[in-house]
Image: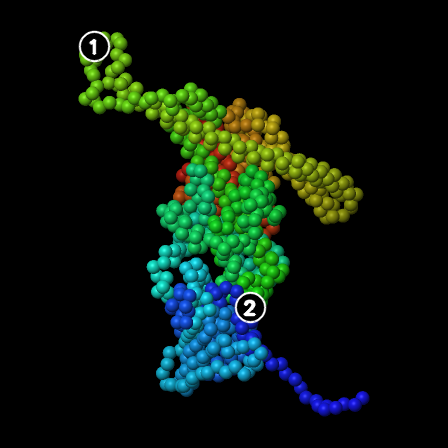
Amino acid sequence: MEKNNYKEDSLKFDVDAQLIRELGERLVSRNHIGISELIKNSYDADSPDVEVKLQNVTSTALSNSKLTIVDSGTGMNFTTVEKHWMTIGTGNKRLNPVSQIYGRPVTGNKGIGRFACQRLAKKLELITCAKTEQGYDHTTVHFEWDDFEPGKSLSQVKCKYEYFSSSTGKPGTTLKLKELREKITTRDFNMLLKSITFISVAQQTKRAGYEEDPGFNATIVAPEFENTPGTERFLASDKILSAGWGTLRGTIKHDGTIYLALDSKDTETQNYTVRDSRYHALSGIDFTVHIIPLKGKVGIDNRREPSLLTNETLKSIRDEYSGIKLYFNNFRVYPYGEVSEGDDWLGIAKDISTRRGGSEHAELSELALKMGLPTASRAMLNHPGTRSLIGSILIHGEATDSFVVKMDREGLVETENFINLKKVIRLSLDWATINYEAWLISARNKRHQTVVKRFEQSFGQSFEDDKSRFIKAIETLESNKNLEETPVVSPQPASLLKTDDQYNLDSGNRDLTVENHFNIGTRPNVQREQVGSAKELAVSQYEAIEAENELLRAVSATAPLLFVFAHEVKGIAHSLLSQSTELKSIAEKIDDPKIQQQLLDMANNASHYKKAFDDLFELFDVFSDSASNTKKKISFSNLFARVNKGFRFFIEQFGISLTFSDVSPRWMIPRLNQAEAYSVLINLLSNGIKSLIASEEKTRKLHVELSLDESQYTLTVKDNGIGLSEEHWEKVFEARTFDPEGKLYSSISSVLCDEQLSNLGKGAGLGLNIVRNILRKHKGSVAFSKPTDSWNAEVKVEIGK
């Protein structure tokens, strides 16, 4: 084959100047994101602050418009400008992943963020000063973006510069964007202002091997918008945000374990842990979410500090802060958390609109039932909406390698890790919602007790039970149907009242005395008060009955499971008996006395465990047939004997001595049915046992004492455990309160191994609340009292005969 004009060499790519325009337009789709990209460069340069200035930006004629970004960072020397700033896709930040002075993790690594300038304006003037070994480098570069025309090689486009060095200078960089491409409207400015307000969460910190980082602050100066309505910024401190119902905090550890903590109204800090190796790539992510429900329940205030979080403040917070925002290396990632723009990146609004009832996480459904929620399938109906959630998710450290920021800077690529992050946040919010629902139940109960008290005060008497109280309310409403139509005669001034002589009435027929004259006017007012309290009681009682019915339905749903469990316990007990008999039979055939004794010991242990199972099964019988047990009564002596047998095996493991005072077998427990009586005593003893396990007492004692006077029985449970400070005596009877002093379970943990601690269980903080509700239902009471003699805690139960 003939080869004409043959030559051999190498080729290289050239770049069309239009690439700069493409990068600028594709890099950012919205102006405020472009400005955010430029601000990030100031952070990477170790600047403690950055200022954005707007001039002549509202007119359609933008020839004199200017957007200036000024920082006081390290600046750039001439070599850095030439080799890195002027190079597209430079790897400088990949080679230097942390800043020089403060050790900040740099926010960008693609080397193209600065081309956002082209998207924003026609011209750019870069002014930078950097300290060098010889003094200071001063460099100014002028960019005419329209010179980067299609069809022209990028290397052919020249950008003029000026450079000089000096012995003095002030390090920093200024970007002057001139002749903006679009005017800035009030709406644009509001978005920009909000963007700058929330752009970074970088705070003062000290990183090993670097100077202390003072943090990072961004401000904006815009004279044209100073007097524009709606541009004022409402700055909410953490104290104000924490005045809502609750604050949820979470962190993900290196093995994927999620640690959650919730501080909420009327409740001690709740903690929850989720272990899942799928989340190990999210290690180091932290998040905080303030839960401020915008829709309260009637008669229930869900704010921790109502005086601090007023309705007006609440509106400002909703407008400015609503949404869960995401931060990558301390900088905001859009559009996550832009609720006002319709963002629903976690799918919360979607689930609320479809009335999602239960959580997708099975472990949370079990927890919901354990915490006293009527049914787990409805636990999410009160999930806070997106406007009720104010939070931030911080992706930093090694976790940043697990995510990819989209090219246009709007969001993260939907990778498996990003999907898992959303799952973690939703799981955490579901857990917080369960706690919120449990608090609502408790708050409704408190409100109902207030309504009951007000009702009885309006009638000047107390009632035997809910039934008699409810009947009185219905009778009152029935007998006063036409009260609203009855004219009210107001009391007249004393000067207008006639005396008996003026009425010319004899002493035996004085219907219009001064006293009766006043009663004509005041009686309807009293009736109205009674009718009002009766209506309130009827509604509140209905809600209480509904809640109780829901709880009963949930309990009934667990009955088959309890039956199966009890059946299995019976099977184990019979198996132990068979094994004990077989071991004894084998022992009789063994000649070696040592081996024979070992077999007999094993047989005796099996018999002992069988007896313990039998004792425990007797307690199962009490709760497995709740319908019949609601009518059964029991004597104090039988209650003590059966509970003592049921607890015997358990307390022997911890060296606890459980004793009961001698009582007459004729003393029947008044008012409470059998199941209620067991529930009261078992809950009180369980708390005493935990207190004893946590103590360092060598002799652990738990005693139940009973006394009787003319009107009531008094049952006292005493222990010499760690005790409880008087300031918490009332607090522990509130739902979800299990360790107000924070020393019970930490002390137990130091005594028990993990397996024993798991078997003992932390509980849900409902036991004492259940006890109080049972007794309150029957006009009884329960409270801590000052310990006597050698005891460290005493709880007294009083119930009328």
Query: Which residue in the structure is indicated by mark 1?
Result: 504
Q: Judge the density around disc 1: few (<14), some (14-19), many (≥20) Cα neighbours within 10 Å.
A: few
Q: Where is 410 relative to 121, above or below?
A: above
Query: Which residue in the structure is indicated by mark 2?
Result: 26
Q: CA distance from mark 2 to mark 1?
A: 101 Å
Residue at the extreme right:
1
- In this figure, what is the number of numbered marks? 2
Q: Judge the density around disc 2: few (<14), some (14-19), many (≥20) Cα neighbours within 10 Å.
A: some
* Relative image position of residue 128 (x, y in whole percent): 42, 78
* Relative image position of residue 308 (x, y in whole percent): 37, 49
Quadrant in the picture for residue 531: top left
* Relative image position of residue 169 (x, y in whole percent): 37, 81
Question: Is residue 604 shown left or right of residue 366?
Answer: right
Question: Is residue 201 shown left or right of residue 277?
Answer: left
For the question of whether residue 718 can be seen, the reply is no
Q: Where is 197 relative to 207, above or below?
A: above
